[in-house]
Image (cartoon, helix red, strand yellow):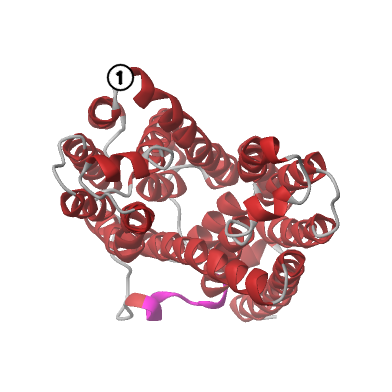
């Protein structure tokens, strides 16, 4: 790409001296995001036991209330992410992290003192409403990191977030047996309070983003909204690819392994993709800084589509585990690249709000993925789930490739007009 294009289209970035503390900020954000994601996911293994302890006795009701309680946090988080992002643009990103960590610390501690299922669901809703540390960290890192290191830094942060998704259920499966369910909530609340203190004392306060100059506001202030919409859809596709097999995984694995191995192998399959993404997010983010974020996004979607096809034909459990791990490796670069493209496509004063919309689109993928997987698996067949997901990933790759070429053409025209050629 011609140098003039980048200068014409990219928003102004702070001067290098304003990046003095970006590494320290990144370290705190990674640790804080890890602990808060662990807090949001650790109750999955013991949630039915806690629901029963709160007075729900019917087996079907336990399952139903467990699903409602677990999903409640992600529902309110998806609704409020753009709001918190917009407030971060207006009042500063550090302030939003302080709010999120303190809110999560209080709410998680209160969950250990719930007396009935309604209180638990209400607190889970409140956790999603007051939380958002990970999404807030994405905004801070994206806006307070030198542009040449943005993909790498966001990759490190994405690794911490995905590691929290892996570690949460593991911790939730062991800690309650050692200290009890209620004490587990109190212990996690104390850890997040430590995150709150670290955020206050170690993250350098960032000034609120300057208002966008001119009369335009909102989406009208973005010169070209196409890259942003493309990234919102790509974020949804990422989560859809990871979550589409959730409804069928145990039944599918049961066809491949002995009955006593089903639970263990299913767990490996579910965590394999996340582990692959943890390992690849930072290297792929660094690669994207060098070769371009669009290229990594397109290559990742193509690789995912290719790796999904053999998953429909596996005959051994280990084959599925390996393929899911490789798929996770391929998808690991998407989160940092999505955030980088959005950050470089919008004015600085709108980065938080747009990245908030990106978070919401990813939560939407977590909802849509299992719905599609369950419908296709139940009406067409379990192997068709992999084929359908592969088609969606391939369509996403083609769509991003087409969008990239159109954006480059538009940028070239702008560059020619600005230089008078």
Please indicate, yes or no, whether residue 315 appears anywhere in the rendered image: yes
Quarter of the image that includes the N terminus:
bottom right
Residue 285 percent location from the top left of the image: 64, 45
Disc 1 is placed on an element classified as helix
Could you tell me which residue is drawn at 63 percent across and 59 percent down? 248
Extreme residue toward the front, this view: 58
As drawn, is 348 to the left or to the right of 298?
A: left
As drawn, is 355 to the left or to the right of 401?
A: left
Could you tell me which residue is drawn at 69 percent across and 71 percent down? 396
Picture quadrant of residue 168: top left
Residue 305 percent location from the top left of the image: 77, 62
Does 240 lie within the magenta span?
Answer: no
| Residue 48 or residue 204, whichever sits in front | 48
| Residue 51 or residue 68, whichever sits in front | 51
Could you tell me which residue is drawn at 33 percent across and 76 percent down? 218
| Residue 141 or residue 75, whichever sits in front | 75
Please indicate, yes or no, whether residue 265 appears anywhere in the rendered image: no
Q: Which residue is mark 1?
A: 179
Picture quadrant of residue 370: bottom right
Residue 205, relative to residue 55: is it above or below?
above
Check disc 1: other Cα within 10 Å, few if <14, some if 14-19, many if 20+. Answer: few
Q: Which residues are magenta?
A: 219-227
Disc count in the image?
1
Quarter of the image that includes the C terminus:
bottom right
Could you tell me which residue is drawn at 30 percent across and 33 percent down? 204
| Residue 207 or residue 236, whichever sits in front | 236
Extreme residue toward the top, this view: 178
């Amino acid at each position: 790409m011609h140098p003039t294009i980048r200068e014409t289209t990219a928003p102004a970035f702070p001067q290098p001296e304003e990046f003095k503390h970006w590494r320290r900020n990144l370290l705190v954000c990674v640790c804080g995001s890890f602990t808060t994601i662990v807090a949001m996911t650790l109750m999955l293994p013991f949630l039915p036991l806690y629901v029963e302890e709160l007075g729900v006795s019917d087996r079907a009701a336990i399952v139903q209330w467990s699903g409602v309680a677990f999903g409640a946090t992600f529902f309110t988080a998806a609704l409020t992410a753009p709001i918190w992002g917009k407030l971060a643009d207006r009042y500063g990103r550090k302030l939003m992290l302080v709010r999120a960590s303190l809110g999560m610390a209080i709410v998680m501690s209160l969950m250990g003192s719930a007396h009935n299922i309604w209180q638990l669901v209400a607190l889970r809703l409140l956790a999603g409403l007051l939380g958002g540390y990970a999404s807030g960290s994405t905004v801070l890192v994206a806006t307070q990191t030198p542009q040449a290191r943005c993909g790498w830094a966001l990759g490190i942060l994405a690794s911490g977030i995905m590691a929290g998704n892996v570690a949460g259920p593991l911790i939730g499966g062991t800690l309650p047996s050692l200290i009890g369910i209620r004490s587990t909530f109190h212990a996690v609340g104390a850890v997040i309070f430590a995150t709150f203190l670290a955020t206050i004392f170690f993250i350098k306060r960032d000034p609120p983003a300057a208002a966008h100059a001119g009369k335009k506001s909102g989406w009208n202030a973005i010169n070209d909204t196409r890259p942003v919409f493309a990234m919102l859809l790509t974020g949804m596709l990422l989560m859809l690819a990871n979550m589409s097999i959730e409804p069928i995984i145990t039944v599918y694995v049961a066809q491949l392994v002995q009955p006593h191995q089903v639970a263990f192998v299913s767990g490996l399959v579910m965590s394999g993709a996340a582990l692959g993404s943890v390992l690849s997010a930072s290297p792929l983010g660094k690669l994207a800084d060098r070769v371009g974020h669009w290229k990594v996004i397109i290559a990742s979607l193509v690789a995912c589509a290719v790796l999904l096809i053999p998953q429909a034909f596996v005959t051994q459990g280990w084959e599925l585990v390996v393929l899911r791990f490789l798929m996770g490796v391929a998808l690991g670069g998407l989160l940092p690249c999505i955030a980088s493209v959005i950050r470089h496509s919008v004015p600085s004063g709108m980065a938080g709000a747009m990245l908030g919309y990106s978070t919401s689109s990813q939560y939407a993928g977590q909802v849509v993925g299992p719905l599609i997987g369950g419908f296709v698996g139940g009406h067409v067949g379990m192997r068709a789930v992999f084929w359908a997901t592969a088609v969606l990933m391939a369509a996403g790759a083609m769509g991003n490739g087409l969008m990239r070429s159109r954006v480059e053409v538009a940028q070239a025209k702008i560059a020619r007009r600005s230089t008078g050629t």
